[in-house]
Amino acid sequence: MQPNSAATPAAGRVRPTDVYFFGTCLLDLFLPEAGMDAITLLENLGLRVHFPQAQSCCGQPAYTSGHPNEARAVARAQLGLFPNDWPIVVPSGSCGGMMKHHWPRLFAGEPEQALAEALAARVVELSDFLLNVLDFHPQDRGLPTRVAVHTSCGARREMNVHVTSWALVDRLGNVERVVHDHESECCGFGGTFSVKHADIAGAMVTDKAASLQHSGALEFVTADAGCLLNINGKLAKDGERVFAGKHLATFLLERTGGKA
Amino acid sequence: MSEQQTITLYPSRQFKDNARAALKDGELRQSLRTAMDYLMAKRLSAFSDGDELETLRTLGETIRQRCLAKLPELLEKLEAQLTANGVQVHWAETTEQANEIIHGLIARRGGTLAVKGKSMVSEETELNHYLEARGVTAVESDMGEYIVQLAGEKPTHIIMPAIHKTKAHIAQLFHDKLPDTPYTEDVDSLIRIGRNALRDLYLKADVGLSGVNFAVAETGTLCLVENEGNGRMCTTVPDMHIAITGIEKVVEKLTDVVPLYSLLTRSAIGQPITTYFNMISSPRKPGEKDGPREVHLVLLDNGRSQAYADEQLRKTLQCIRCGACMNHCPVYTRIGGHAYGTTYPGPIGEIISPHMLGLENTKDLPTASSLCGACGEVCPVKIPIPEMLMRLREEEQRPAGEVVAHPLRGQGAAHTGKEALAWRTWRGLFGQPGAYKLFGWAATRLRGLTPPGQLGWTQNHVPLKPAAKTLHQLVRERDAARR
Amino acid sequence: MSARDNILAKLRNAPRSAPVEPDVAAHFERFGPRWNEVEALRHWATMMRSVKTDIVWCTESDWPQRLAEQVKARPIRSLLLARQTPHGALAHTALEHNPLLQLKTFDRMVDDWKDELFNDTDAAFTVVRCGIAATGTLVLWPDADEPRTMSLVPPTHFALFDTRTLHADFHTAMTSEAWPNGMPTNALLVSGPSKTADIQLTLAYGAHGPRDLVVLAVLPPHLSADQLKDAA
């Protein structure tokens, strides 16, 4: 397993006492339990988790839809929420990628440029943080199972953290991680892409759901709410009642007995 | 830039309908998936050393950026060097001009038959139709292009033009269209049929047409990459050779082609090298017994200078046309090249076509991507394709009346009042903590009223329904309980 | 204004920043192959054979005889060669006693015998300028004696290759031979017989150029074919 070479800042590499948690709008509105699970997981590992109540969204939906002014306005509202020099943990590769790589671009030449760059340097994706900063070795208390892992494209190609979810799952003694067909391929979410090009996005998520279902896994995990809503939404639409996915944080918390 | 443009609004074309039809074609889907899987695996095996690959990609990027930074000077140098070598250079701003020049050269000799090596730029200008209408038959000689032309279609892939066809399709096509040809699905036999049909034409053709992979300014050399030998035939046997290429294809030095050629063949088809690398620097010299007596190069702009005008969009022109972005694109893999309705399909097509055709004719292309980044990851010259797509999305969303310093044809073409209002509303809700808190409160309270139809989302998914409590609320409740 | 002036003016009008100068030589110094003579030849032969090239190891003295054997082993009734060159004369001497073989010389402009070249010439014999080990490649610089169509039109191409001219990679070949100082009318890299995979990705040889490429690879006196035997 390659160590994560993503340029995570020195501040994030040293085990901190406190972290900020940026919940992301999708988790906030549609999968809040997964957000709570991530927070609980971090607290169980001895961290103080700070959740700024004024947070909303990183701005990505508008940014990738050709509306940078709207994206900037929303991102700007987040910039003042992280005054202490703590890591900003984000339970999503694509939102993390937005904050880490695109905020500096979005605020280039703006008065907030330096602040955005400083924050970007402190952003760390949850699985990367658990593995590479906390060196989390989860004690697996669950029954033997098989899971497939879907990694978001943001995590894979922007944050370079696709190996971290695998590594965490591989540290669970009773969990067999299975590889699914075309594992590195996008699930077809892509924000407004899945609305503007519903036919193509539908073909993509159909294929992704099928390859996860046929992988031999009993369930799948992903560290990205967008992908999770996309794939689970598709499975549910097709009437699938058994096979579904959950957020990596939820899965880890369940396996370690932290969740009833 | 002093030039400015005021945004006006345009209608659009048929990409979504084409895509929908292609998605329903099971045979096409299967052909594409098999082919793209094969090409991806081949590429991967051709770059076994990841360190070498990354260093080479960076080198390729640096070379292309250096060549683009000196583009006007290099074009002049190329022209001077080619002219000194005896090659005649022509310039065309538009496809119409390029076709006129080529037809004029052929007509001057009274030519009626041209054989063509593979040239995507000639597809761009729709040269075959132009010539046909003026009494000149232009026959494609690349096997894939020949098949596509015989079928009355256009290429579906820039490297593998007939990738959408099975051997059964081709067997039927040859049987139907070529005299005395029995139906056979044996690929060797099919290739022999194609070979025999074309050899006669090389012999008779008045003119050979070709594209160019790299035009070397330093030595005045046109480099052509191929496996079949048809390119060599077209550029060697007829008495006149006309090459056509985009103005961005010039490289400064002969040594520049070494890494670029390696990147091209390995990225495109996973081959360490192609069968032929054909370097042409002059027409037949006194004493030489073959080769064309006249060689011409047509340099085409067709929107490239628009991309060039902006330093970010200029990166589009780094492309060496390997097709790796197509092979790795989950969208291309599902709809194939024809759906795009453009000469260049797939990710590179999504970012180059708007400059050639205007955003008014291509407005659905920049959004036809989940921004998964696979294209940028494999691009041999590191074009940040997702970044280009986002920039074009921004350009096509500009409102009418906005004045911009970087004019692009068709800017604002995708703007709608409805979408703009949606984003303004979103900004109002998500940009202010108080409004967002209220929004979260309302969304969770009114979740029972979730509409069963949510634009395109519910076509493939159950409706998105807000949770009973937001994460904000759960955290507040937990904090309260702890106090 | 002409199209030329318009295009150049538009390009000049664009903002440009100073480019980074790439170091092509450094790349190939770092990643280029490091082989001894035998390793390089083996790699070259493996690569060429992987794309259906026939390689016949020869010596300085026996290559004309080996050529004659190779010709005899195939249904070849006519062969084009450059009798006026030293190697062409040697080949001619070795082949002229074959009663079933008609020898031809490219002694006219191609325009005067295109039909015969295309339809009644089974093979051609030419010399190779140099080779490239990394990619399994022959470099041809056709000239007045051995014109471009010789290695292209006849279905079988016999190529005489002095293995002492083998370069490690394309970059070394180009720079050590100072190609940038002047290119011929046509220079070619040839890596195998003509091929295509345009029909359902199925590889087929003999698309438009030669179906068969036979290399007579002449080894220097200190090397024997036995040393290269296990090259796949």
Image (cartoon, helix red, strand yellow):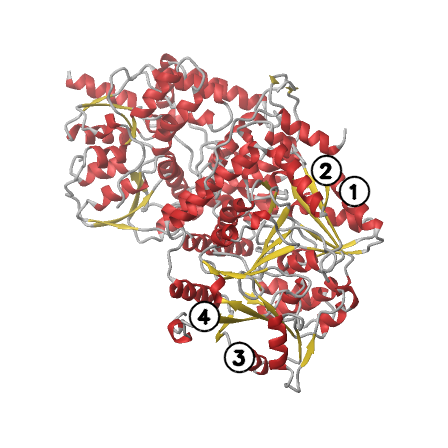
What is the C-alpha distance between the residues marked 4 and 3? Answer: 16 Å
What is the C-alpha distance between the residues marked 1 and 3? Answer: 53 Å
Q: Which residue is mark 1?
A: B100
* Three-letter amino acid code at the position of disc 4: Pro
Which numbered disc, 2 or 1, marks the residue that appears first in the sequence? 2
Q: Which residue is mark 4?
A: C220
What is the C-alpha distance between the residues marked 3 and 2? Answer: 53 Å
Please determine whether, in this image, residue B480 is positioned above or below residue B189: above
Please determine whether, in this image, residue C135 is positioned above or below residue C229: above
Discs 4 and 2 carry the same chain letter: no
Find residue A57 and name its label: none
Tell me whether the residue at label 1 lies in contact with that at label 4, contact meaning CB atoms closer than 8 angstroms.
no
Tell me, yes or no, if residue C178 can be seen here: yes
What is the C-alpha distance between the residues marked 2 and 1? Answer: 9 Å
Crowdedness of circle 3 by 10 Å Cα count: few (<14), some, many (20+)?
some
In the picture, measured across the screen, residue C17 lies left or right of residue C142, that is left
Q: Tag 4's secondary structure?
A: loop
Q: Nearer the viewer, mark 1 or mark 3?
A: 3
